Image (spheres, rainbow, N blue to C red):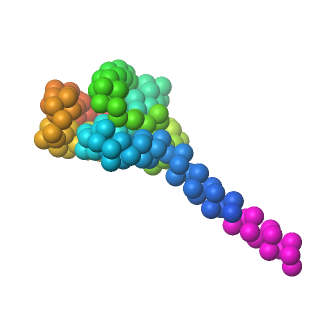
Amino acid sequence: MKSFCTLWLCLAGSVLFSCKTQKVNDSVKKADQVNEVRAKTGMVDPDAAAFLVKVADARMMGAKEGALAVSRGTTADIRNYGKLMVKDQATLLSEIKKIAGEMHIALPADINTDKQDGYADLADKQGVAFDEKFLKMMKIDHERDINDFTKATKLTDRRVTEFAAARLPLIQSHLDKLKALKDGH
């Protein structure tokens, strides 16, 4: 009986530890936690931090999705759109990192766990199924980004509002190119 209880406690502890570890291993959650502490001390603007973390996460995901499209897209148009995503997302992420560094805002090192699951789902697709899933994900991502960047133009930090306003047309152009690509696909 004693060994059964010990075994049960070890198993329960392992389950609880793995759940806690999974949450802590989410790079976006880690960055959010650091920024929350910094915001409480007045070191960072919490709204600016939330925006920069969210769009950094999205830029990393867009680059990963784009790289998959380059290697798996069934048409030259999809592969070229993937190349555009890799290039433009890297440029945007570089700008985000610069602004965040100036503002002492922590950024994630990798995409969040939900995006990791979405990426894995996309990576499992082949052929036309890949193309369709990629186009669908890009549409959702870009529409969300336009919403996020538009909201950010109304934040109080000048660096963030200027960045969002300056880059909103690029995000819109990505969605426009995507729509043209979907119409021709």
Query: Looking at this view, is 115 or 39 the one in front?
Result: 39
Question: Which of the 4 image quadrants contains residue 47?
Answer: top left
x, y percent for residue 118: 45, 45
Q: Is residue 146 magenta?
A: no
> How many numbered marks does the figure carry?
0
Residue beneath the point at 34% across and 31% down: 104
Q: Is residue 138 visible?
A: no
Residue beneath the point at 69% across and 59% down: 14
Task: Tell me: 175 left or right of 125.
Answer: left
Task: Tell me: 159 left or right of 61.
Answer: left
Query: Looking at this view, is 78 or 174 the one in front?
Result: 174
> Which region of the structure is painted magenta?
1-12
Question: Which of the 4 image quadrants contains residue 45?
Answer: top left
Q: Is residue 152 visible?
A: yes
Q: Is residue 8 magenta?
A: yes
The vertical placement of 103 against 19, above or below, is above
Residue beneath the point at 43% across and 37% down: 108
Q: Quick one: which residue is furthest to the front in this view?
A: 41
Q: Quadrant of the C terminus?
A: top left
Query: Looking at this view, is 114 or 19 the one in front?
Result: 19
x, y percent for residue 144: 26, 44
State whether the magenta stretch is mostly helix, strand or loop: helix
x, y percent for residue 66: 40, 29
Task: Tell me: 181 left or right of 8.
Answer: left
Q: Quadrant of the N terminus?
A: bottom right
x, y percent for residue 79: 39, 24
